[in-house]
Amino acid sequence: MALKARGKETLAAYLFLSPNLIGFMIFTFLPVFVSLFLSFYKWDIFNPPEFVGIRNFINLLGFHSENGRFMANDQRFWQCLWNTVFLMFSIPLCMMASLGLAIALNRKIKGESVFRTLFFLPSICPGVAVAILWLWIFNPDFGMLNNIIYWIGKFLGFVIPGPLWLNSPGWAKPSLMLMNFWLSIGGFNMILYLAALQGIPKDFYEAAEIDGANGWQKFWAITWPQISPTTFFIFIMSIINGFQGGFMQAYVMTGGGPGLATTTIEYYVFNNLFTWQNVGYAASIAWFLFIVIFAVSLVNWRYGGKLVHY
């Protein structure tokens, strides 16, 4: 009787799990499997797929000799990869700013809830609305940034020409990094740090104060080790999001330009799939990106985990 009852409970559990399991198989596992299958084909949607083996990956990652020089088979791909990595250089600065803001908002001050809400607001704004807002801010003719630079120059007694921001190949990537910094400092990273800070027992700080520790010593000996799991989690997720990011900015703000200055890997996949109908090639790029993210995450877990205090 007991075995029968247990079998019924197990069956009921599987029945309750089945909707999610079926959804996962249809909408996640199946598309992933199909994309792997397509990465070995040349397909423009309108004609039958043609099996090409690993040619897509050779075209993507291979090099050839041209006039005595080694040239990448797909130079645009390497440019897009560099753009993606360049934009990720702002991750440490964003994390430090989020931590600093969380420490400031963790203090008992009047209106702390209002400040927390105000700093979190950009994170819940629609991405397209934020992109349009920053298009105005970066406008070289009437944008807010160049107006501020103009008035600072006027105050100092000389003219400071504002950069072209998104219209300049040299300034386009730093401009997007500035925008990402604004979006990141008060977003989910700040919330995670705030939760981690509030989970530190007050006894630790009281004992440190009795021993005469100053503010920096308390941060380095207590706060930093206690929030290291949160820092590690945020770092891992930021790296993953960094490799997968840049689509919205390129699609709405720059079109990937000027030139290829703001085309990231994600936007390059989009262009190959929907603009140029290179379905197999887009799938091979997506799988290359998956392997890179998987490898980087493994390295982070292998070596970064040693610095975390659990």
Image (cartoon, helix red, strand yellow):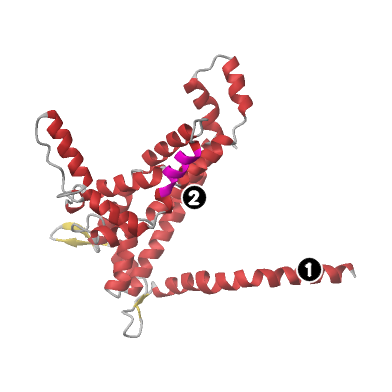
Count neighbours of disc 1 (C-alpha within 10 A) and say few if under 14, some if 14 to 19, many if 20 or more: few
Q: Where is residue 111 in the image (x, y as percent from the top left)?
A: 48, 36
Q: Which of 43 and 10 is in front in this view?
A: 10
- Look at the image and give the residue range highlighted in magenta: 113-121
Name above or below for residue 208 compared with residue 178.
above
* Numbered tag placed on residue 9 in the rendering: 1
Question: What is the residue that sits farthest to the right in this orientation?
Answer: 1
Residue 90 in the image: state x and y as whole percent. 34, 43
The residue depicted at 42 percent of the width and 48 percent of the height is 121
Taking depth in this image into account, of 106 and 180 the one nearest to the observer is 106
Residue 298's disc is 2
| Quadrant, the N terminus | bottom right
**Residue appearing at x 50%, y 43% in the figure:** 191
Question: Where's residue 206, x and y in %?
Answer: 61, 21
Q: Position of residue 214 (x, y in %)?
A: 50, 18
Left or right of 39, for residue 116: right
Asked if residue 238 lies left or right of residue 203, the reply is left
Helix, strand or loop for disc 2: helix
Residue that sits furthest to the front in the current view: 110
